[in-house]
Image (cartoon, rainbow, N blue to C red):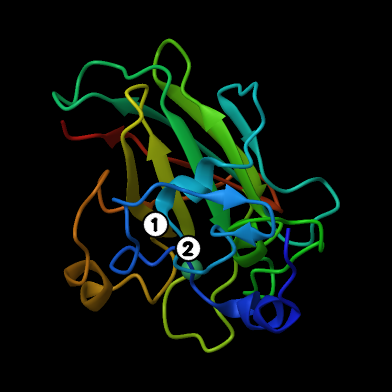
Amino acid sequence: MKSFPILAVASLWMCSCGQAKVNTSQPTIVQDGKDTCDDPDANINCCFLNMPQKLTSEMNIADANEPGLRLELTGTIFQSDGKTPYPGVIIYAYHTDNNGLYSKKENETGVQKWHGHLHGWCKTDEKGNYAIHTIRPARYPDNTIPAHIHAAVKEPSGKVSYINDFVFKDDSLVNEKYISSLTLMGGNGIIDLVKKGTFIYAGKRDITLPD
Ligand SMILES: [Fe+2]
């Protein structure tokens, strides 16, 4: 695949997969010498291109050596009635590192060149449950928006959607202005974290997906 070193540097603190800009109607095309997923506004399907063939309900984004406070997120995805568990939904998530950067390990391809090394996938189990093991992301260096985790889902039918970012209630930028800016998809994404030790935070988010 092509390498774009200048773009790679710029990606360090860009917010990619912007919901308003993404064209979800065009198919993903990856051909010899042309990687259409190497783009900050790539098709949402690019988020699911590099995932492992076998997924469990556990997503491990950050390994034990990743600097930062540990974060454990759990929840259940429900169908549109808000009650029926939704098995087999793939979740993709990515976020900044402890310095607020979408930092890379230089082996990323496709849209992960923009999303950085802190990304992962999982698939809800038969009860619709999922878990994400990672670190708490930091705000972008310009401190203008809350620390957040981007997420997209792929339903068994193949339907793909972005859901609202995971953000954290204890972040002072998760305020009325932020909440009023949201267009809800999968809830507002605001997580009330509980400290489970000196360096571990845990939170829960249930997600209802519309038809
Ligand atoms: Fe972002």
Q: Decide if ligand 1 comes within 8 Å of the CB at mark 2.
A: yes
| Residue 60 x %, y % | 68, 38
Q: Residue at x 23, y 67 (%)?
A: 179
Which type of secondary structure does the marked residue at label 2 adopt?
Answer: loop
Residue receiving disc 2:
148
Determine whether, in the image, residue 40 is placed left or right of residue 60.
left
Dot placed on the residue nearer the N-terminal end, 2 or 1: 2
Let me know if residue 11 appears in the view.
Answer: yes
Q: Residue furthest top?
A: 126
Q: Residue at x 39, y 19 (%)?
A: 128
Between residue 175 and residue 76, name the one nearer to us. Answer: 76
Determine whether, in the image, residue 166 is placed left or right of residue 64.
left
| Residue 65 x %, y % | 86, 52
**In the rendered image, which quarter is residue 6 located in?**
bottom right
Which type of secondary structure does the marked residue at label 1 adopt?
Answer: strand
Q: Decide if ligand 1 comes within 8 Å of the CB at mark 1.
A: yes
| Residue 56 x %, y % | 60, 21
Above or below 143: residue 112: above
Q: Residue at x 33, y 49 (%)?
A: 163
Q: Residue furthest bottom?
A: 142
User: Do the numbered discs 2 and 1 sit on residues whose CB atoms are within 8 Å?
Assistant: yes
Let me know if residue 196 appears in the view.
Answer: no
